[in-house]
């Protein structure tokens, strides 16, 4: 779709994809807020029980950073490119040439 088309011209399927992406962004923000709260709580426990000892809260922090990174990539990363008819034709031609 070109950039000058009115917003109402976008298909319902495309709008649903955008809605899903916005929902993922919302979930990412909520997840990040919860993770940060838990991380602060764990660091406080560490600080008041074994200050300057082994920093064990790093393991739960890493454990929550992995899904947070995945959620960020889905919500804010490079949007997937739409597969066009030209892409399909090119792939069909490539497969024919292999035979």
Image: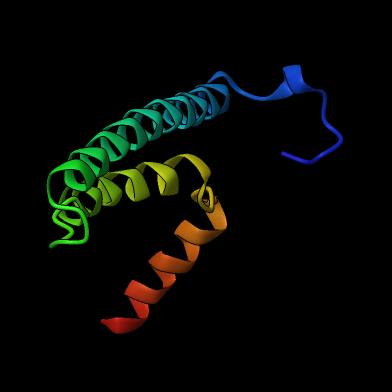
Q: Nearer the viewer, residue 47 or 83?
A: 47
Q: Nearer the viewer, residue 88 or 50?
A: 50
Instruction: Residue at 39% x, 75% y: name it.
Output: 94
The quarter holding residue 36 reads: top left
Relative horizontal placement of residue 83, taking residue 42 as reference (left or right): right
Name the image quarter holding the C terminus: bottom left
Q: Nearer the viewer, residue 89 or 8?
A: 8
Which residue is most to the right?
A: 4
Q: Nearer the viewer, residue 87 or 75?
A: 75
Instruction: Residue at 45% x, 26% y: name it.
Output: 20
The quarter holding residue 32 reads: top left
Picture coordinates of residue 75, whole percent (x, y):
47, 39
Picture coordinates of residue 45, whole percent (x, y):
18, 39
Instruction: Residue at 21% x, 39% y: name it.
Output: 42
Relative horizontal placement of residue 67, taking residue 20 as reference (left or right): left
Relative horizontal placement of residue 79, taking residue 47 as reference (left or right): right
Tell me if residue 29 comes above or below residue 47 in the rendering: above
Picture coordinates of residue 82, whole percent (x, y):
53, 48
In this rendering, the count of numbered labels is: 0
Tell me if residue 1 comes above or below residue 17 in the rendering: below
- Colour scheme of the picture: rainbow
The quarter holding residue 56 reads: bottom left
Picture coordinates of residue 50, whole percent (x, y):
13, 51
Name the image quarter holding the N terminus: top right
Relative horizontal placement of residue 69, taking residue 8 as reference (left or right): left
């Amino acid at each position: 779709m070109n950039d000058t088309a009115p917003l109402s011209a976008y298909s319902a399927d495309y709008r649903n994809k955008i809605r899903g992406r916005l929902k993922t962004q919302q979930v990412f923000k909520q997840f990040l807020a919860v993770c940060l709260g838990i991380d602060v709580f764990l660091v406080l426990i560490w600080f008041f029980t074994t200050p300057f000892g082994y920093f064990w809260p790093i393991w739960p922090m890493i454990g929550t950073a992995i899904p947070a990174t995945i959620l960020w990539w889905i919500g804010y990363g490079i949007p997937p490119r739409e597969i066009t008819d030209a892409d399909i034709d090119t792939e069909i031609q490539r497969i024919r040439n292999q035979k």
